[in-house]
Image (cartoon, grey):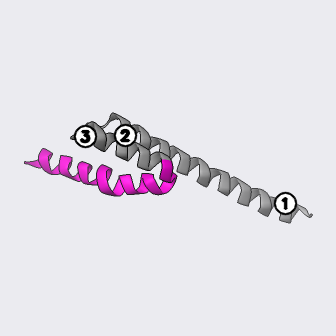
Amino acid sequence: MGALEFAIVMLFVLAMVFIFLAAFVFWLWMLIDSIKRDFKSDGEKIVWVLVIIFLHILGALIYLAVVYLPSKSEHKRRGRS
């Protein structure tokens, strides 16, 4: 393997490590947010924590779309009025 091929392979490996690390940090961020958040019931909190744990990145993306982003936009609307 020449130097160019080695550099391309190492660049690919480095990119994959970065992507996996970023995905893990995002997953952990959503998991911590779901644990700290005050839901209407404890059952709702347990369901979201389990969704994030068992569905991994997909669960974190669902939580982001259903809970995290709508609550942020609601908070901004309340702050303006």
Where residue 27 appears, x then y in whole percent? 48, 47
User: In percent of the image, x 32 and y 41: which residue is there?
Assistant: 45
Asked whether 8 or 16 is in front, the reply is 16
In the displayed orientation, state which residue is furthest to the right.
1
Query: What secondary structure is the magenta-colored segment mainly?
Result: helix
The residue labelled by disc 1 is 6
In the rendered image, which quarter is residue 35 located in? top left
Answer whether labels 1 and 3 touch (C-beta < 8 Å).
Answer: no
Asked whether 43 or 29 is in front, the reply is 43
Which of the two discs, 1 and 3, labels the residue nearer the N terminus?
Answer: 1
The residue labelled by disc 2 is 33
Q: Residues within 10 Å of mark 2 (few under 14, many from 20)?
A: some
Q: Residues within 10 Å of mark 3 (few under 14, many from 20)?
A: some
What segment is highlighted magenta in the picture? 54-81
User: In percent of the image, x 39 and y 57: which residue is there?
Assistant: 62
Q: Residues within 10 Å of mark 1 (few under 14, many from 20)?
A: few
The residue labelled by disc 3 is 39
Q: Nearer the viewer, mark 1 or mark 3?
A: 3
In the rendered image, which quarter is residue 3 located in? bottom right
Image position of 8 (left or right of 80): right
Where residue 70 appears, x then y in whole percent? 25, 54
Q: Nearer the viewer, mark 3 or mark 2?
A: 3
Q: Is residue 1 magenta?
A: no
